[in-house]
Image (spheres, helix red, strand yellow):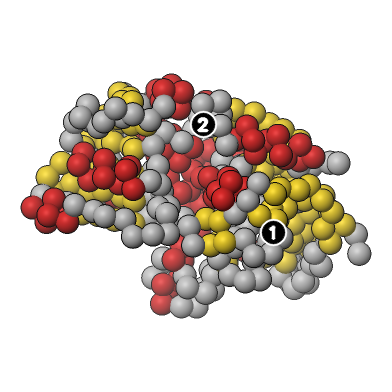
Amino acid sequence: MDRDRACVIHGAHDLRVEDVERQPVGTNEVEVAVAVGGICGSDLSYFLKGAVGDFRVREPMVLGHEVVGIVAKTGDGVDPRMVGRRVAINPSRPCGRCVLCQARRDNICRDGSFLGSAAPFPHVQGGFRERLVIQASQLVPIPRRLSFETAVFAEPLAVAIHALHRAGDPRDRVVIVIGAGPIGALLTLVARHRGCASATVADLRDEPLQTARLVGATRTVNTSTGDEGLEPGDMVFEASGTPGGLGTALRSVSRGGTVVQVGLLPGIPVPVPGSLIATTELTLQGSFRFTGAEFQEAVTLLADGLDVAPLLTARIALNSALEAFTLASDRAASLKVQLIVGGR
């Protein structure tokens, strides 16, 4: 069987570019020649810790779920005219049958799968490989005017869109974002695009806050010495994935306001100020991934010209994946790093 070059995680700090067997194309499936992949925070967590929350790497796993490319082959049940189509890949594959899927909450389907995830065993292999076989239903065509390097932002942008949907309409509201990583920056960008009154972004470092200003933050606050500089917000998004960030979010929301937990917290109990939640009648919402409709919405926004260019730090060839992950791990030097996968 033919083989592909792929970016494979074996454990913490054990990342290898190696040959893996090419996947067979089954009924209702397509083979995509992957062009570009975006390195996500969960990919970095697998690289640095060998785990994401409670999901630990127990076998070699191809990383990557932010991928775009060109349809190279179709299986039975798929229109062969799909070959040559430029596509973004929705990494989520919900069951489509359960109560949650029927209620259009397919992002929290119990029986779904997600590219590059160690949650189940065997793991779901990811998309940082030259050829990826996927269900045709997971493809979203992208227009010629949309470059691959922009289109690959669809997945993290969909995460931001879902979080905003969880909070409600941001129009004329005061928004605070805790954590100025890629998701925090995209939350800021979309909130501003949708007409929020102001968007304050907080982080422990100055470098990502500079990018936050480029995507529309009206104010930035370095909270390395405390969060006293944050004024109350109607909607507060915790995008740092840290217990300290959640505490800051809960202290920074207006009475009767909403806090949305977007970042994945460590898989341990995290203390919260319960009395504050009660006495201010704040709403604490969880936000996990995105629905299929939100992924399509992200592609449409990008095709319509939403400017994500300030987030892109570097594009590095797949064979130099270790260099790419090392750079992406340095928050002072990078925000979003992409792997150029197409070609050897």
Q: CA distance from mark 2 to mark 1?
A: 25 Å
- Does the image show residue 318? yes
Q: Position of residue 204 (x, y in %)?
A: 38, 30
Q: Which quadrant of the figure contains the N terminus?
A: bottom right
Q: Position of residue 266 (x, y in %)?
A: 42, 54
Q: Position of residue 121 (x, y in %)?
A: 62, 71
Q: In the drawing, what numbered circle is on residue 42?
A: none
Task: Give the structural element (helix, strand or loop) at label 1.
Answer: strand
> Callout 1, which amino acid?
Met
Q: Position of residue 178 (x, y in %)?
A: 34, 38
Residues 14 and 18: in front is 14
Q: Which residue is mark 1?
A: 61
Residue sitting at 20 percent across and 42 percent down? 251
Judge whether 193 appears above or below 65 on screen: above
> Callout 2, which amino acid?
Arg
Task: Give the structural element (helix, strand or loop) at label 2.
Answer: loop
Residue 220 left/right relative to 5? left
- Does the image show residue 67? no
Judge whether 281 appears above or below 122 on screen: above
Residue sitting at 78 percent across and 47 percent down? 17
Q: Which residue is mark 2?
A: 331
Residue sitting at 41 percent across and 27 percent down? 205
Nearer-N-terminus badge (2/1): 1
